Amino acid sequence: MSSDRGTHGAPSLAEALAAGPLVLDGGLSNQLAAAGHDLSDELWSARLLAERPEAVTEAHLAYYAAGADVAITASYQATFEGFGRRGIGRAAAARLMASSVELAREAARAAARAADVARPLWVAASAGPYGAMLADGSEYRGRYGLSVTELERFHRPRLEVLAGAAPDVLALETVPDTDEAVALLRAVRGLGVPVWLSYTVSGRRTRAGQPLEEAFGLAADVDEVIAVGVNCCAPEDALYAVGTAHRVTGKPVVVYPNSGESWDAEARAWDGRASFDTGLVDDWLAAGARLIGGCCRVGPGTIGAVAGRVAEAR
């Protein structure tokens, strides 16, 4: 399965990955925060879809300009339930979710018009885990007490909305356990848009404690999945996951860890020291990575350095 919706009459993302590695963007939230936007409420960056959509476009543009080939939309924490708590009805919530794809497309078009950006660009529509909707840090634990069927029912409606907005790929990201992965893989059936599946991990296991061989194996024979890997994890945990994902699935691997700092859900703040070293990119590439970027607290400057490493590999 593939999509042919990229800019410049671009090849599908799957076709591009077959030709060589690509660069993902970094943390959208930290770029928005750096521009002075308050993201402290439960909707996180999704709040700006309604209140400051132009700020979202500007943040995407910063990453495209830094060298990212793929931008991930501001829909990670965008759900019908989350918007509903803010008094936003389902129809309006659906429009906001779909707008996240168009805002990233707008940034891609702006980047394409710039004299220094003449390469194909793609848009990945983010679908965060159930725990992101809870806004209590539970995406770093998983095991919500819901069945696979219940999780599938939660994810399917917004995945339908995001797919209908015509992204190049759906990013099923920050998945903490295998139950949610199974639910997501069921929920994307028949949507007509390819996906990547990305776990958040601790050491050699998912956040919920399952072996990564088991977790990645779920995606090995799923036609919709064009890449599998990890995000929102410590940089030092990424290499084992990349190698395991490549060995188990034979698919291109996506990797975009955090800066190395830790999220304090109670304080709603990051603490610790950054440990993202762009020298790791060479190891990730050697282990099978084909989509490389950063997650929380990784900004355009670091993505520019990642792009330089990937360009050398090309």
Image: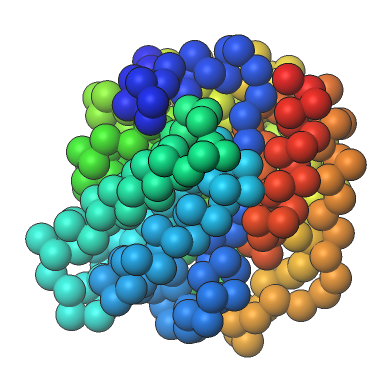
Rendered view: 292 above or below 139: above
Left or right? Give the position of 234 relative to 224. Answer: right
Answer with left or right where residue 79 lies relative to residue 210.
left
Return the residue nearer the eye: 112 or 135. 112
Residue drawn where x is 86% and y is 59% of the image: 275
* Residue 280 appears in the figure: yes
Q: Is residue 165 above or below residue 196?
A: below
Q: Can residue 257 be seen by looking at this rendering?
A: no
- Residue 71 x %, y %: 49, 45
Residue shown at the point (74%, 53%) measured from the top left: 302
- Which residue lies at the image location 62% right of the left edge and 21% below the top edge? 252
Query: Residue at 82% across / 54% down in the picture?
Result: 276
Residue 25 pos. (x, y %): 58, 47
Residue 201 lies, in percent from the top left, at: 70, 48
Quarter of the image with the N terminus is top left
In the image, residue 33 sits, relative to residue 94, either above or below, namely below
Residue toward you, 312 or 160: 312
